[in-house]
Each structure stands twice: as structure tokens, then as C-alpha cells.
Image (cartoon, coloured by chain):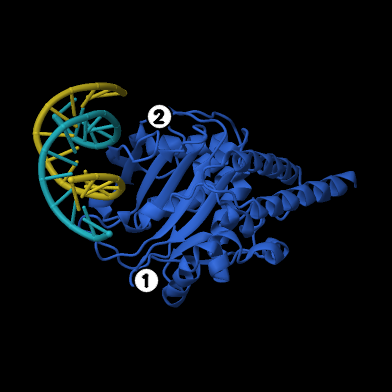
Chain colours: A blue, B cyan, C yellow
Amino acid sequence: MEQEALLNELKEGREVTNLLMKHLHLPSSHQTPLVLIEKILGSYENALSILNCNGLVVETKPSLSTMESLPSIDHSSPDKRDVSKKRKTSSGWTEQLRVYSGTSLDNPVDDGFCWRKYGQKAILGSNFPRGYYRCTHRHSQGCLAIKQVQKSNDDPTIFEVKYKGRHTCNQTSHFAATYVSVSTESENEGNYSPKRQHQLEVKQKQAQQAFSSFGSGIKVKTEDLDNKEDIFPSFPFPVESEQVKNGSFVEALMENDIMGNLSPAFISPATSESNYFSMSPCHMGSFESDLTDIISAPTSVTNSPIGDLDISSLDKLEFDPSFPFDNPEFFY
DNA sequence: CGGATTTGACCCAT
DNA sequence: ATGGGTCAAATCCG
């Protein structure tokens, strides 16, 4: 069918764009082109997603390389230590950087988890303040997930979101579930008001509902921060509502892919729509460190390693049903 | 009234 | 000394 052909074309375009991106190792100051590329990719992803919805199965996994190669947004440097300014001297963190482009609401970053903002700070060299969030269930469930959200200087429509630590609260599972359903259902609703985090449940729904909107690319970049001792493997977030909203569901998967990349184990074969991995909270032990190492490796890793060649292979990667995310410890 | 956000102060690694 | 992360009192909001 023609759709098949269309699909192939789209995939082709996506891959090429990914390659282009990888070859564009622009200085962080020139992120604009990357932003555009991200948008292009977002369009591809959306198109593919649409096709998926129509029954076609597309491997939606934009190459990991894509994300890894994202040179833009490197705001990693400062972070390496940021995490531990105060009491958290102990941990190395796995950090996820996501970029939400496209519609930018004031509060673009809604990932389906309940976050409580605990601070905001102007960052040197940044035009926009960075917001600090921690899981609402920090106390009740001891969930130590944290995230930082900051608008990109170059493109205010892009939000850089960094996740640190992982959710140990139930949300996670919910989310996964939610997510799944999201993929299945799709209604619309799209927006939610910024700042109403306590409406998590609502948000999640919204997320689900929003699932068909529009999209733009979301990129994730995992960086590793120093210590390997306690690395939290993970990023518990299966997929985030934003992503859903953006319709880049696929990309959401990618995120995980990345992780998967690091440790293939994570990824499970799912067509993007159907299964999302279930977060099984416990595993990863051994290779966590590996991941870290891998990731943390040369920054360049991010840029090229798995890069070119892998794209194709990556695409083939499938998600591993057993999603080994676990959260070791991570406390102050 | 309870929970979330705001915001300046404080803490700590560089 | 400085920049970034967190705390916590004040404030906001449903």
C-alpha cells in the first residue's frame, strides 16, 4: 500500500534529519538550527504516530543517536555538581534532559507526576530562571525524584527539563498505566493550567486526552553525573504527558531508548503504542553502573557514539518487557 | 484550612 | 567570593 511507501519515506526523512543533526555539532550558542531540526523531527514523529494510529505499525524509535547527538542544550556542565550542593553529596545522578519545544505554555513540563516546586533561581547566563521541583510524595512516600525546568535561552519555546533521581512513589506505576491507556485512547484537551500541580490526577488524564495534539520534538539526553556509586538508573518516567501532548509519544519511547541504549535490557519491544514498559522496580543493579559509565563517558558520547551506524540498529531495538528500573537508594 | 507556590536567605562546592 | 541548590516563612488559592 501506499501507506507503506509513505511510511518509508517518513522514516527515511527522519533518519536523515537525525544524521544531519548529528553532524551539526554546533556550539551551544547556535542552537537555533537544532531547534529547527528538532521540530522537523517532531513532525516526522507525528506523522509516523498518525500512521501508527491508522493501524500501521511503525517502529517508532527515532534513533537514539538523535538524542544523544543533540548538541544543543548543553547545560550539563554546571549540573554535574549541582545536584549535590547541599546535603546530597552522596549521589551521582542520572540526569535526563528533555527539551520540549513547540507549544510552550508557561508550564510546559508536565510529565504526569506530581511535582512540588521548592525553589527557583536565576542562572548565570540564562535568560530564564530555573525552577526546582521535587516529587510531591517526597515525604509521604519518600520519593526523591527531582527535576529542574528551565527555558532555553535560544528558544523560549523550548524547555529543558532535567530529571534526577527516580520516582519511588506509586505515581510511577500509575503513570505507566496511564500512559498505556493514553496511547490507546485519545481525546483531547490539551491544556492545563500552569502551576496546578496538585491536580495530578487531572493532569494525567489530560495527558492522556491530549495525546493527539500536535507536536514537536522532545529530546532527551542523558547525562551522567559524576559519581557512579549511587547512580540512579533511572528515570522512572515512562513517558510524559507532555510528550503525549505533543504527540511525540514516540519520542517518549525514545527516551527510554536511550536508556535502553545504555542497557538494552530496558527496552522492550513494543510498538510505541501498545506497551509501554512496565516499570518494574528492581533490577538494574549491575548494569546501572555500566550505564553510567557509558553515559558519562566522554561527553562526546552523547554526540556520536552510538551514532551513525547505530541508528538503524537502534531503530530495531525493541523494548524489553522487563524494564529494569529500580531505584536503589537515594537519599540525603 | 490545607496544600502548593513564591522568594529571599542560607548552605556548600568551586 | 561566587554560583547554584535547598530551605522555609509568607503568601496564594481552591
| Quarter of the figure with residue B9 | top left
The answer to whether residue A230 is left or right of residue A251 is left
Residue A236 is at least partly visible in this image? no
How packed mark 2 is, by other alpha carbons closer than 10 Å (few <14, some 14-19, many 20 or more), is few
| Quarter of the figure with residue A51 | top right
Q: Nearer the viewer, residue A252 or A43?
A: A43
Q: Residue at x 50, y 53 (%)?
A: A238
Which residue is tagged 2?
A194
Return the residue found at the far bottom: A286
Q: Earlier in the sequence, mark 1 or mark 2?
A: 2
Residue A192: x and y in percent read 45, 29
Q: Nearer the viewer, residue A193 or A288?
A: A288
The answer to whether residue A125 is left or right of residue A35 is left
Please state which amino acid type lies under the numbered disc 1: Lys
Q: Secondary structure at mark 2?
A: loop
How packed mark 1 is, by other alpha carbons closer than 10 Å (few <14, some 14-19, many 20 or more), is many
- Looking at the picture, do discs 1 and 2 lie on one chain? yes
Residue A264: x and y in percent read 58, 70
Please state which amino acid type lies under the numbered disc 2: Pro
Above or below A189: residue A130? below
Frontmost of labels 1 and 2 is 1
Give me the chain letter of mark 1.
Answer: A
Disc ID at residue A228? 1
Q: Residue at x 55, y 35 (%)?
A: A209
Q: Residue at x 24, y 55 (%)?
A: A85
